[in-house]
Amino acid sequence: MNLLKPVQAAIQNSVCATPDVDFVVVDVETACARVSSICQIGIVGFRDGREVFAYETMVDPCDEFSPFNTRIHGISCDHVAGKPTFAHIHDVVHGHLSGRVTVAHSLFDKGALAAACHVHARRTIDTTWLDSVRVAKRAWPHLASHRLNVLTRFLGLRHKHHDALSDARAAGMVIVRAIDHTGIDLAGWLKPANDRSGPAPEPAPDGPLRGQRVAILGGSRDGNLAHWLARAGARIMASVGTTTTMLVIDGNQPFGNYVQASAPHRRAEELRAAGSGLEIVSEDELRRRVGGDPDR
């Protein structure tokens, strides 16, 4: 019996049925320490903040099962008997991920897919990766851990940890909730951490904030607040440092009730405790103090 025919038919049907998505999420479980040993894969597509498709399969890893890995996810050689290999399902995985934004909770899954493509002599998957751990750390900096099971408890999400489909679904909801919580859209999260804004505007030669070296919490160095501060004479700093004289909290900052847990705020408090005269002030308070826009 040719096992490839039903697998190939399922692949074709799955790829053809995939709707348009904003992003997809992938999670894999592995059989042993070799990251190529994928034994389960889950893929979920999201559009407009909702799940629109899900794909999951057990995979014959063509490798041994480590007792350590089995204890984590509960998958053994008995569960993958007669299941397709990664070579068999490569096309459906490629069809779901290629050319799209692909989310993974840490980039372990990215490395596992690349290794499996190499071991099984299949083309690499060309996709744009987004690490939901990095997103979660910026959206909820107050959390002591950003492991997926910790995040799902915090966000009140149903989740079966170390099940590939459930993990993929949960990581996708982390992105959805982070976008809703911060107001940063998907394109904003895709920007590198050091490339989320352009160069800071040059300070005006005089103005009520002349001589101030200002860092902004929750806003970019080329945003509306930064331009207003520069017009008032302030020099915009890239981060809170020893020469910073003021930390201004953007009125649209993404940290919600957790401003004090954010890294810039903590650093500013440390400097203040060490004797710095650095001032922490909200955008609204500073605008009232300065008197609105100096250009108006």
Image: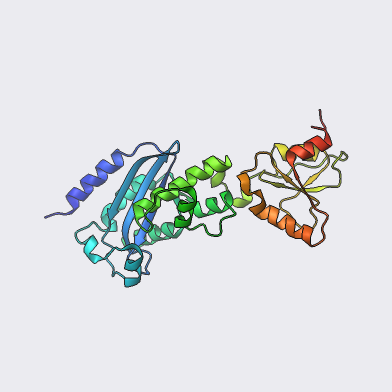
Up the image or down, 187 lies above or below 241; here it is above
Q: Residue at x 75, y 57 (%)?
A: 241
The quadrant where residue 21 appears: top left
Q: Residue at x 23, y 61 (%)?
A: 79
Q: Residue at x 14, y 54 (%)?
A: 2
Q: Residue at x 25, y 41 (%)?
A: 13
Residue 102 visible in image: no
Residue 284 versus residue 186: which sits nearer the camera? 284
Residue 218 visible in image: yes
240 on left or right of 149: right
Up the image or down, 244 lies above or below 77; here it is above
Measured as percent of width and height from the top left, residue 155 is found at 48, 48
92 on left or right of 157: left
Measured as percent of width and height from the top left, residue 45 is found at 38, 43
Colour setting? rainbow
Q: Quadrant of the N terminus?
A: bottom left
Q: Residue furthest right?
A: 206
Residue 272 versus residue 48: which sits nearer the camera? 272
Up the image or down, 137 lies above or below 281; here it is below
Measured as percent of width and height from the top left, residue 53 is found at 34, 41
Residue 275 versus residue 24: which sits nearer the camera? 275
The quadrant where residue 16 appears: top left
